[in-house]
Amino acid sequence: MGSTSDIKNNLVMEFNGNLWKVVEFLHVKPGKGNAFVRTKLKKIPGGQVIDQTFRSGEKIKDVKLIANEMTFLYADESHYHVMDNETFEQLPIDADLMASVKDFLKENDSVKVLFRESTPVDVEVPAHVVLEITETDPGLRGDTATGGSKPAFLETGLKVTVPLFLNIGDQVKVDTRTSEYLERVRN
């Protein structure tokens, strides 16, 4: 059991019978009245985001999760299969748990699986991934990086907006938190 002074980014807590991860927080000390903590919480699993305010000193139930580095192997109709990098044990993870990260996964990518006791409750991917463009309009001679933009589909099925000069087969870096194009990756 902790208090609001323990709140920090990525803290996992139990609130209203569910697990929530702190995405953002702000300690507020108004000139008049009591201090409070304003938070943005993300539901685990599911990804629903809510704004929640806690009174200063209020008790919270923090949850200890065990993080395990694993390798994504393949997906079937209802599960994503991962392998523990140390024991080589394979584990099926429910597709619902992978919903927020599935567009960033290729075979043999590393993922961090968070466990509560022996049950997987969340999956994290790196902040940036490199993916290949598989479908987009062709780039035209004279298109520059400061020009317009166009939609592109990546090898995982993710749709992003990219600069006009990019073509099919180009590698791009994508931010997994916002699903936005960051830069072209040169081979």
Image: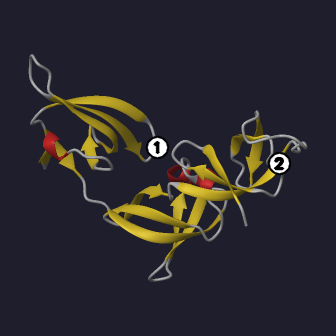
Label disc, if present, on residue 46 of the rendered structure: 1
Asked whether, in this view, residue 61 is left or right of residue 46, the answer is left
- Secondary structure under the numbered disc 2 in the rendered image: strand
Position in image of residue 30 (x %, y %):
14, 21
- Secondary structure under the numbered disc 1 in the rendered image: loop
Position in image of residue 80 (x %, y %):
58, 62
Residue type, mark 1 in image: Gly
| Number of other residues with Cα within 10 Å of mark 2, as a class: few under 14, some 14 to 19, many 20 or more | some
Residue type, mark 2 in image: Glu
Q: Answer whether labels 1 and 2 touch (C-beta < 8 Å).
A: no
Give the residue drawn at x 78%, y 56%: 170
State the residue position of label 2: 135
Q: Nearer the viewer, residue 16 or 57?
A: 57
Q: How far is disc 1 from disc 2 in space, using C-alphas?
A: 29 Å
Give the residue drawn at x 44%, y 82%: 86
Name the mark nearer the viewer: 1 or 2.
2
